[in-house]
Image: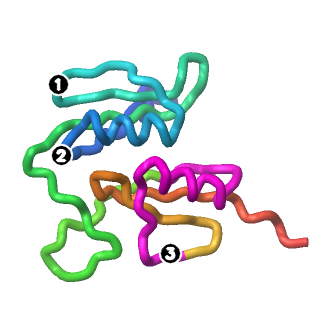
Amino acid sequence: MSFSARLSTVVLDAHDAHELAAFYQNLLGYVVRAEEPHWVLIGPPPGTEGTSLAFETEPEYVPPVWPTRKPGDQQMMLHLDIEVADLEAETARAVTEGARLAEYQPQDDVRVFYDPSGHPFCLWTEMPPPA
């Protein structure tokens, strides 16, 4: 079966689209592809592959809660998984860029963070095969 559709962009709401776009632009080495007063599209530099991210200012934005604490909390509906080669170094860099390390860390080869708007995201690395 042949498909003509492909996932091109993930859109995240935020209190300030430009602020959140700048965070992910710095974290991922992405470039701005388009912007408007309340919307920004970033993506991999020309000649490289990857999924673009867009950010939309939403005045009524409520950050998600992860892990869920009580009924009625705005639950996480999605999160971004970002593969890195050096988990320790990229963890330090993410914090320097403005990410907040989550208190709960579910596994050794993943670090869960919150971006400046409170969206959870993960940095992960493949565990080396057992010797």
Q: Residue tagged by mark 3?
A: 105
Determine whether the residue tagged by mark 2 lies in a helix, strand or loop: loop
For the point 44% across and 34% down, which residue is it? Answer: 25
Amino acid type assigned to the residue bearing label 1 in the image: Pro
Instruction: Evaluate if marks 2 and 1 touch, with contact meaning CB atoms under 8 Å apart.
Output: no
Amino acid type assigned to the residue bearing label 2 in the image: His
For the point 47% across and 65% down, which residue is it? Answer: 112
Mark number, residue 37: 1
Number of residues whose C-alpha sits closer than 10 Å to that of mark 2, classed few (under 14), some (14–19) or many (20 or more) = some
- Residue 45 on the magenta span: no
x and y percentages locating residue 9 in the rendered image: 38, 34
Left-right relation of 112 to 74: right
Q: In this view, does 92 lie above or below 13?
A: below
Gap in angstroms between the C-alphas marked 2 and 3: 26 Å
**Of the residues under marks 2 and 3, which one precedes in the sequence?**
2
Q: Which residue lies furthest to the right in this view?
A: 131
x and y percentages locating residue 50 in the rendered image: 53, 33
Q: Residue furthest front?
A: 96
Is 92 in front, or is 57?
92
Q: Is residue 33 above or below residue 120?
A: above
Number of residues whose C-alpha sits closer than 10 Å to that of mark 3, classed few (under 14), some (14–19) or many (20 or more) = few
Q: What stretch is highlighted in magenta?
A: 81-106
x and y percentages locating residue 55 in the rendered image: 28, 37
- Residue 87 on the magenta span: yes
Q: Determine the image quadrant of residue 20.
A: top left
Is 76 in front, or is 111?
111
**Of the residues under marks 2 and 1, which one precedes in the sequence?**
2
Q: Residue tagged by mark 2?
A: 15
